[in-house]
Amino acid sequence: MSVEIPQRDGDGYLVDMNSWTPEVGRAMADADGVVLDDEKWGQILKAREYYEEHAVVPPIRKFAKYLDAPSKEMFNLWLTGPMKPITKYGGLPKPTGCV
């Protein structure tokens, strides 16, 4: 069963944050050729939790501390600045600052 992906902007972020569901997040990653394992998915859900609590996307250092995980491991896991895919597939706003 394929999930229809809502409208995305030029960077692949959802235009309407409220159209996110876990299925949409996974379908977006799939469409982008990104494999979301349990660890990555867990980080995405934690980022959503953080956003709900603080109404802001955390910088990587703060988020790594929130997860109690070394940020270096997060970079190795995502092979890129982790906050960009985490926020994108989590249906969150684009992180500001260095990502």
Image (cartoon, rainbow, N blue to C red):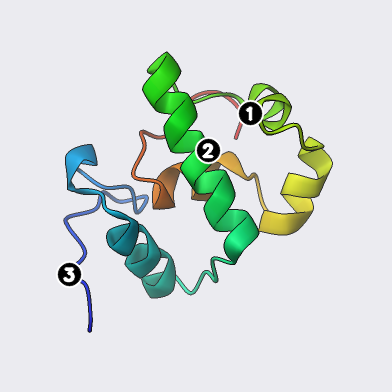
**Above or below, 88 relative to 24:** above
Q: Secondary structure at mark 3?
A: loop
Residue 79 can be seen, yes or no: no
97 or 23: which is nearer to us? 23
Residue 63's disc number: 1
Q: Residues within 10 Å of mark 2 (few under 14, many from 20)?
A: some
Please say if the residues under marks 1 and 2 sit with CB atoms less than 8 Å apart: yes
Marker disc for residue 37 = none
Q: Position of residue 28 (x, y in %)?
A: 35, 64
SS at circle 2: helix
- Tags 3 and 1 touching, CB below 8 Å: no
Residue 83 location (% of width, % of height): 57, 40
The residue type indicated by label 2 comes to Lys
Q: Quadrant of the N terminus?
A: bottom left
Identity of the residue drawn at 48% across and 74% down: 33
Q: Amino acid at mark 1?
A: Phe
Give how far across and how far down residue 85 sits, in percent.
51, 50
Total numbered labels placed on residues in the image: 3
- Check the image and report above or below for 78 versus 94: below
